[in-house]
Image (tube, rainbow, N blue to C red):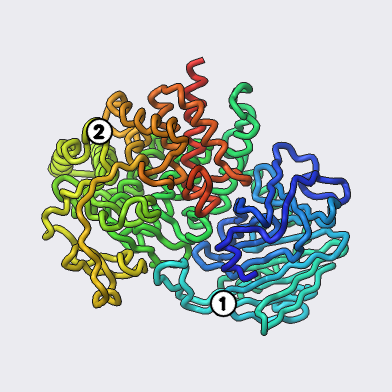
Amino acid sequence: MPVALLLGSVLCAVMCTTTAYGDTLEGPLAGAANSKPREWASNETNGSVHCMGNGRLCVYGQGPNILQLFGPSYSTTTIGGITLEAETATCVSRRVPGAAIWEHRVSENGVVVAVITDFVESELPCFIRQVEATAPITFMFHPEPGLRVAHREGTFGKASAKGSLLVETPIGRPCVPFGNYPIPFAFFHQFSWRDNVSGEYDPAKREATITFGPGKGTLFVSGGPELDACLAHMDAVLSTDYGSLLTRTRSWWASFTAKGRDFGRELPEDIPQRERLIQVLDDTAVLIRAQQSVEGGVLAGYPYHLGYVRDQYGTSRGLAALGHIEMCRDILDFYFSIFSKFGAIHNAQAFGIPGLFHVHENDGVEITGYITLQAFDYLARTGDTAFVRRIFPLLDWAWTTQQRYLVKGMLPFNGDETYVAGGILPRSALNDGSAEATMLFVDSGTMLADFAEKQGLWSKERTDRERKTLELVQAAYRGNFWRGERLITNNPDRCADTASLPPTRHGVCEACNTVQWTLRTDAGRYVCVDCLDKTPLPKIEPRTYKLQSVSLTPLYFHSSLFIQEELRPQVASILQAYKESGKLPSRPDSDVSVGYDYGLLLHALTELGDPMARELYEKTLALADDTGAWAEYYRDHKPCNTRCRPWESAINVEALLHWIDREYARK
């Protein structure tokens, strides 16, 4: 199956059942506690995806199949997928607790015929798969179109192996499947295999066949990015025995897990679904760590090989709740490193590819507020004033750049809002006033002004000037966004003066949905050059939206613009609709919700002390999939988009822990 079809269908190529782990073959999980089986079926759209990575090389898997393999760096593209060729086989997969080390037990007619152990080695950019089999099992590697592949007996380097493939991804490949962001260098990967493994490459079919067993055999896949580095990495891993590679990877993960909270000790015994919760908390910590690059930023999931600011804000809060504050600092360090070199932060930045940005509409707003809130959340948790002083130039820029967008006391939307990208809020409303972006401006700006004044980083004249701006925006906020005890998402009045609207912007063409430079038409729509002479898009009549996600953000941000009690009616309205319909759509007339809506509602109910918080706790936890992760979007409580997401998973686990802290503090 071509990897494109594999990803599109999000189906595993093998059936997986509840086959119990037998004693036929041993594996690394023997005797492991808190290890849950992951189950897939070829005739079901389960879709759970797991991640393995060490910050340099990353692998997304689904059962024994590999969906993507890429790196170094985390912003390079996948080289393809590896699929098990076994129509009648069954498979059960489990993860080593506290580590991104996976074991897959493949069975025929209820008898285990192979144990597969997968991990990314801790010190080298290398994926390792060892298989112990009683009968031959075959995998197919399907390289992405346009890649160059060479096959030889032995290796392309100095160390010995039975056979190898060398894969070159040519210069100019786009780093993401949307937007014209070419990678400015070629990069390389090498496959090598040892022991009871044989491999062949068919250049006509553009596929490699790799067969394991009977007995033990090992597959290694190293990354470069440069050719000499790729070969050196393979030589290094082949020069180390398999047991040592697995042991030091286990130790690396044990060191990571030890830095986090020990929930087995901390959590009261009578917490609802305690065992499942502890497993999911471990799942989330590991999936985020596996997706954190050595540069410090965190991937947003397998289609998005970049560091997105909005995603990393929620991810940072979840990491802090899990006890991994060191990772929160790494994310901020990533931003500051980019800013120090280029003087700006955009919607998303590449890892290890200097100057490559994913630029969206109005990138000077919203994400800038998130960065500042994230910095002061870190400061509040750690008291690390010296670090925040060091990155203060970034925070100062984030504040200053937003002010260019102020119109009538309102900021517009950033073009990659989750609800915009998901079609919940139309792109034609991006220049409307944004309740969320403006709220972030006030709250983050207030924190920044307080810090700058206390640390003597601004003059008195500047401090007075910035506080005056804050006062004006804050004074206008309710008139702009508060309607009958409810927060509106957007205010079209910001666009009444068309002279304030940008004539061009970089983002999504409203006609062809490509990401590039666009121009504003007479109808107020933004289209690319190719679409200018096509049938013009009609003018959009102004419309006000009330998205539930936005209505819940004041409590999530602990916004200074409101007191809790005045937010209770709008939360009660959302809760009542949920009770009546059993659904939680982000927009009342839709059936789609963003994956963090559940966490936001749970957080709000917890803050307000609502007894329904218990039910939302159980609902939110139940939505975690077989790998303990949440998805980007849900339709009728079913995942309908990217899985294994750090942002949604982090927000939801923070909400789960917040409810426990509040609920059990009362007892």
Residue at 43 percent across and 46 percent down: it is 591
Residue at 35 percent across and 30 percent down: it is 571
Q: How many marks?
A: 2
Q: Is 443 on the left-hand or right-hand side of 410?
A: right
Task: Examine the image and state in which quarter residue 193 appears.
Answer: bottom right
Which quarter of the rendering shows the N terminus? Answer: bottom right
Q: Is 636 on the left-hand or right-hand side of 429?
A: right
Which residue is label 2 attached to?
561
Tell which residue pokes out farthest to the front in this image: 580
Task: Examine the image and state in which quarter residue 503 appears.
Answer: bottom left
Q: Position of residue 307 (x, y in %)?
A: 44, 56
CA separation in Å, label 2 and label 1: 52 Å
| 257 vs 555, nearest the viewer | 555
Specify whether residue 119 is in view. no
* Label 2 crowd bin: few (<14), some (14–19), many (20+), radius 10 Å: some
| 129 vs 632, nearest the viewer | 632
Q: Is residue 540 above or below residue 384?
A: below
Q: Amino acid at mark 2?
A: Leu
Which residue is label 1 attached to?
145
Question: Mark 2 against mark 1, which lies toward the viewer?
Answer: 1
Q: Amino acid at mark 1?
A: Pro
* Label 1 crowd bin: few (<14), some (14–19), many (20+), radius 10 Å: few
| 524 vs 154, nearest the viewer | 524
Q: Are marks 2 and 1 in contact (CB under 8 Å)?
A: no
Q: Position of residue 430 (x, y in %)?
A: 26, 55
Secondary-structure class at tag 1: loop
**Earlier residue among tags 2 and 1:** 1
